[in-house]
Every structure is written in structure tokens, then in C-alpha cells.
Amino acid sequence: MKRLNQTLKVMSLLFLTFSVTSCDDDEGMVTPQEQTIAQLASSRAEFSTLVTALNKAGLTTTLNSSGNFTVFAPSNDAFNAFLSANGFANLDAVPIPLLKEILLNHVISDELFSNELSTSYVKTLAKGAASTTNTLSMYVNVSPTEVRLNGVSTVTEANIDASNGVIHKVNTVIGLPTIVTHATANSNFSSLVAALTRSDQADQNFVGILSGTMSSPFTVFAPTNAAFSSLLTEFSWANLNAVPETVLEKTLKYHVVTGSNILASDIPTTATNINTFLEQTFSVNATGGAKITDYNNRVSNIVATDVQCDNGVIHVIDKVIVPNLN
């Protein structure tokens, strides 16, 4: 019996020692949820290029700080494809200011897990060339099968949880969006894109103009698909291809303002004429809801505002505005 009691005492002591040691080890371990976004990215081999880029751009401190961030994190393969497509020999060849803005274009100042993402525009932390106050917009398109970002990148692994936010792995580096990027990303603008790219409009090179910086920044009042459908009904055109060439050209130019990034806050409260790319004016007024009155006294409501691009801004309108067609 005495020997049994001694054995039990030894076992109890060993159990107590193991328990204390286990507690001490647990306190010393850092679980993924206790790591910051920057630390968590550093722990995963597929984000090594991203980590290097963050260090070069001076953004590691930001993603180590307290807060709530969502980071759409490109894989190493995504960075390699980006460098090759843009003629950069390696990461060192990317100018630091450009690299910083591209990286910030992958960051949202809010923690959004996959079940909190919806089809909508969100603001990134990047600043484009067109505005010093309105950060770049990202179009998030959520479907039953995937999450697409600006129409160019897909989430391949979601909800990598960190202490200061969440990482979603993506398969493509998301470049700074132009007017054309946002027009093509949002399926509600498919009629507008079809009009801009119609074969008889090739000489106008609308896509080239609205993708570039000449005459920028641009303010584009973008009609929805429903707006184009209403226009076809109103003028008894069977479809978009039935719109006469010169009518289409003038109408498209009438929706673009060159040399100015007009934000919603800039829209005056009294009716004011705005000169367009067509060199005709329409009247805009913010009182009672922002609206445009075109040459023919037709009124279009501005239903969404301030979709910021690197070379301008888009406002969504519910009716195609029509200029003087004579």
C-alpha cells in the first residue's frame, strides 16, 4: 500500500508538471487569429512576393497596426504575371509610388468576411491620379460560384483570419482601374460597353480615350442597361444596332466631360450648364436629388455617384441623355 501511494504521488506530480508546462506553452504560442495581416502573410510561402512588396512600399507597418482591414492578397504567381504583362523585369523595377498605390488598391478599411461581401462598390485605400480626396473604387461581384474584383481578379481562398482583419487570396494583381475597367466590370453597363465598342465607332476609339490620360480626368455619366432599353423604345429603334452611326457617336460624347473629376459634392444646387466632350451643354442640378436636363428637356436622375477611377469618375444615370442631333 505504501508503495502504491508513492506511485500515485509521483504520477500526480508528473501530471501537475505537464499541465503547467502545457499552459505555459499555450501562452507562448501565437495562433493565426493573434497574428496581424502582415505577420500572417509572412508565414505563408505563397505570399512571399506580396510581403517583399509591402516592405518596399513601406506598408508593412500599416498592416501590422491595430484596426480592421480586408486585404485581397495576390499570390506569387499573380505577381509574376503582373510583372510580365507590364514589362517589369522584377519587383525592383516597379516605381515605389506606383507599387504603393497598387498595393493599397487591394486594401479596404473594413473587415469583410466572405459572407459579408455583396455585389457593390467599395472604397480601397488607393488614390488615383484623378482625385486627391476620393479614393479608388472597387467593384465586388458576388455570384454563387465566385467573387470577382473589378472584373479581373477572383478570390481563390477566403477568410484567412488575422487579429486586425481578414485576408482573401486572389489570383490576379488588381491594377488601378480606369473608366473602361469599371464599365466592363459591371454587367449593368453592358449596353454602354456595346455602344462604345460598336464597329462603326472604331474611328472614335472611345475605349482608348477612356482608358488613357489624354484629356483626363473624365467625368462620365453612365446610363444603365435599362436606360438604353428605354431609349430604344422611346425612339422606336429595334435594337442598339439600329441607332444611326452619327446619333450614337454624338450621344456617347454627350455623356462625357473632359478635364474635370466632378464629384457628387461638386454638383451645384442650382441649375448649371456643363460643357461636354461633344461641345454641347446639359444642365445639372442637385436640389431634390441630383439630375440632368438634356438639350431636349428630358430629365435623367443620377442614381449612384462617385465611382472613382484612376483617370476619372463615373456617375450612374437612369436615362440616356440626348443632345442636339441636327
Image (spheres, grey):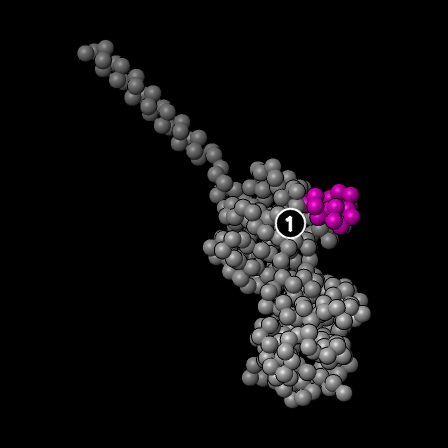
Which residue is located at x 68 percent, y 77 percent?
242
Determine if residue 291 is in view. Answer: no
Q: Position of residue 275 (x, y in %)?
A: 74, 81
Q: Looking at the rendering, which quadrant does residue 269 occupy?
A: bottom right
Residue toward you, 248 or 22: 248
User: Considering the numbered disc 1 on the image, is that residue within a helix, a strand or a loop?
Assistant: loop
As drawn, 104 above or below 78: below
How packed mark 1 is, by other alpha carbons closer than 10 Å (few <14, some 14-19, many 20 or more), is: many
In the picture, which quadrant includes the C terminus? bottom right
Name the residue rendered at 49%, 53% in the picture.
Answer: 114
For badge 1, the amino acid type reads: Thr
Q: Which residue is mark 1?
A: 172
Number of marks drawn: 1
Choose between 129 and 277: the one closer to the eye: 277
Q: Position of residue 58 (x, y in %)?
A: 67, 48
In reply to whether residue 39 is colored magenta, the answer given is: no
259 displayed left or right of 134? right
Please identify the residue farthest to the bottom as the structure is shown. Answer: 297
- Pick whichever, 14 or 242, lies toward us: 242
Residue at the image point whose x is 33% and y is 25% from the top: 16
Where does the magenta region start and end? 79-93
Residue 310, image x, y percentages: 70, 62
**Residue 88: within the magenta?**
yes
Q: Is residue 272 above or below residue 51?
A: below
Q: Main secondary structure of the magenta part?
A: helix
Quarter the N terminus occupies: top left
Furthest residue toward left: 1
Q: Quadrant of residue 208?
A: bottom right
Q: Residue at x 69, y 71 (%)?
A: 195
- Say above or below: 212 vs 147: below
